């Protein structure tokens, strides 16, 4: 197989291992242009798509690769990985089992299956799957990482850190594997009370994914938005005639309680969370582009609103339907003009705790370039707050602000406030939001599958002066 592989596909695999997804994408597409049924090219391109958020295309590619060559365990394993990414955990387990029929000792598949058990909050099953390999010795780094994650979930962070420290520096591994190793080690160290060592691990992980955050470009973007949506002319400008009052848009910084707020609404019998939809930004890009919003007519606004609702169809009869795309904080003026009766919720959190939470997370590659340094986080936050303060002036009390700290301190009172704002009566199910069984695909999946806890409220305090670069950027 390897001797017959297209050299461009092999180069793509190397590029992907070094974090160069764009190069890998181009190489695979060039190979497929010459040979449309090259299953290895399809599989590698599917992996690229999975890493860059093109899930639908990736799923179709890997299914086509399996149809062409269905006896490769790694293909079935990749399909399972992608299903796990989309929250289809039971389907993923079936695909992992299919993979193991062809290679019962494939450690990448076994690690993936164990990781899916962790996503299902079943760490004991994950540990049972991994321990035979660990006891035998010579396991791959991926096995060690998932084993450490299981130990963390079972309350053994020191044991987890020892497992991971034994695999460092792992320079022969791919960039993404090394990132996962460092961020997992940071979590283990932090839970073990070793804050300085945890910070060092987070820093190593972020340096592997450091991006070129363009603050000047963000400032220009926000300036243009503010100049386009002035409060003195906003009320007089055309609005859609759409009367849908069921739509709820949640915005905020990463790690500010937005997923928790969405889950509370989704737990209500008449609420539904749709997750982080790319629908509205895409439609606005396609329908409006660089055109001044003030030139849109009522008919055009109606057409855009109708298209959004059609593309965000749902199966329930919910009266509160949540779109939790955080990037919509830049689109709030358009949202109000498209959906005059929509509800907007702004989730906030102490910027230091929020900053630590962003810094300590393994974010998807090539996304949120500002989050790989404390300075970047602070500067992005300042710009985000500047625009949100403008929206507060423009939108007034039609936008509800929900503080993460207040939600934790007064769960019932804040839950009541949220439900009342979106037009729902209080329901005790919303106080037990973790019991819904809903698959949550955001970074906050751990928090919303367990009862409310307050250990993250003042998380920044344990890092002391290590956060001074963040304080400097925030002007604190």
Image (cartoon, helix red, strand yellow):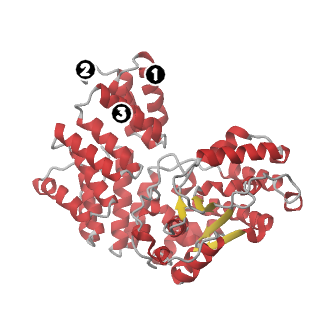
Q: Which residue is mark 2?
A: 3
Q: Position of residue 122 (x, y in %)?
A: 27, 63
What residue occupies the far left of the structure in this picture? 136
* Quadrant of the image occupied by residue 340: bottom right
* Quadrant of the image occupied by residue 237: bottom right
The quadrant of the image that shows the N terminus is top left
Distance from Cα at disc 3 to Cα at disc 2: 24 Å
Instruction: Give me the residue at 47% from left, 54% from top.
Output: 363
Of labels 3 and 2, earlier in sequence is 2
Instruction: Give me the residue at 57% from left, 67% from top.
Output: 470
Give the secondary structure at mark 2.
loop
Query: Please, is residue 90 above or below residue 445 in the view?
Result: above
Query: Please, is residue 285 above or below residue 93 in the view?
Result: above
Distance from Cα at disc 1 to Cα at disc 3: 20 Å
Please identify, in this view, whether the residue under mark 3 or under mark 2 is nearer the observer.
3
Q: Position of residue 418 (x, y in %)?
A: 60, 73
Q: Which residue is mark 3?
A: 63
Q: How many marks?
A: 3
Q: Nearer the viewer, residue 358 or 230?
A: 230
In the picture, the disc for residue 30 is 1
Q: Residues within 10 Å of mark 3 (few under 14, many from 20)?
A: many
Q: Are marks 1 and 3 in contact (CB under 8 Å)?
A: no
Q: From where the camera sits, is residue 339 visible?
A: yes
Please identify, in this view, whether the residue under mark 1 or under mark 3 is nearer the observer.
3
Give the secondary structure at mark 3.
helix
Q: Residues within 10 Å of mark 1 (few under 14, many from 20)?
A: some
Q: Residues within 10 Å of mark 2 (few under 14, many from 20)?
A: few
């Amino acid at each position: 197989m390897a001797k017959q592989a297209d050299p461009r596909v092999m180069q793509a695999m190397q590029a992907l291992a070094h974090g160069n997804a764009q190069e890998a994408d181009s190489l695979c597409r060039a190979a497929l242009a010459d040979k449309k049924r090259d299953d290895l090219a399809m599989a590698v391109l599917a992996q690229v798509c999975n890493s860059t958020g093109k899930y639908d295309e990736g799923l179709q590619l890997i299914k086509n690769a399996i149809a062409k060559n269905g006896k490769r365990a790694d293909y079935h394993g990749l399909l399972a990985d992608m299903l796990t990414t989309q929250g289809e955990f039971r389907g993923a387990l079936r695909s992992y089992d299919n993979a193991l029929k062809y290679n019962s000792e494939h450690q990448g598949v076994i690690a993936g299956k164990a990781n899916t058990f962790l996503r299902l909050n079943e760490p004991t099953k994950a540990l049972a799957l991994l321990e035979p390999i660990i006891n035998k010795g010579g396991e791959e780094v991926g096995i060690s990482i998932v084993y450490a994650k299981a130990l963390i979930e079972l309350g053994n962070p020191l044991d987890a850190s020892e497992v991971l420290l034994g695999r460092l520096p792992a320079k022969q591994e791919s960039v993404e594997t090394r990132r996962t190793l460092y961020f997992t080690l940071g979590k283990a160290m932090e839970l073990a009370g070793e804050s300085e060592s945890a910070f060092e691990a987070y820093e190593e992980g972020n340096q592997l994914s450091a991006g070129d955050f363009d603050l000047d470009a963000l400032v220009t973007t926000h300036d243009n938005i503010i100049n386009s949506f002035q409060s003195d002319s906003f009320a007089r400008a055309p609005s859609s005639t759409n009367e849908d009052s069921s739509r709820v848009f949640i915005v905020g910084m990463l790690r500010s309680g937005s997923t928790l707020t969405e889950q509370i609404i989704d737990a209500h019998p008449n609420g539904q969370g749709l997750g982080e939809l790319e629908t509205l930004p895409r439609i606005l890009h396609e329908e409006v582009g660089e055109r001044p919003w003030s030139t849109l007519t009522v008919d055009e606004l109606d057409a855009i609103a109708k298209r959004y609702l059609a593309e965000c169809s749902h199966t329930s009869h919910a009266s509160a339907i949540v779109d939790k795309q955080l990037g919509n904080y830049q689109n709030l003026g358009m949202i109000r003009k498209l959906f005059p009766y929509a509800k907007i919720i702004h989730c906030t959190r102490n910027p230091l705790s929020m900053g630590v939470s962003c810094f300590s997370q393994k974010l998807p590659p090539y996304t949120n370039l500002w989050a790989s340094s404390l300075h970047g986080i602070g500067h992005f936050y300042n710009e985000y707050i500047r625009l949100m303060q403008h929206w507060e002036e423009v939108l007034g009390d039609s936008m509800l602000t929900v503080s993460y700290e207040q939600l934790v301190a007064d769960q019932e009172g804040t839950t009541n406030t949220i439900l009342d704002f979106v037009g729902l009566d209080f329901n005790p199910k919303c106080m037990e939001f973790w019991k819904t069984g809903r698959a949550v695909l955001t970074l906050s999946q751990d928090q919303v599958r367990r009862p409310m806890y307050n250990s993250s409220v003042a998380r920044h305090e344990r890092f002391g002066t290590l956060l001074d670069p963040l304080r400097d950027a925030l002007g604190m």
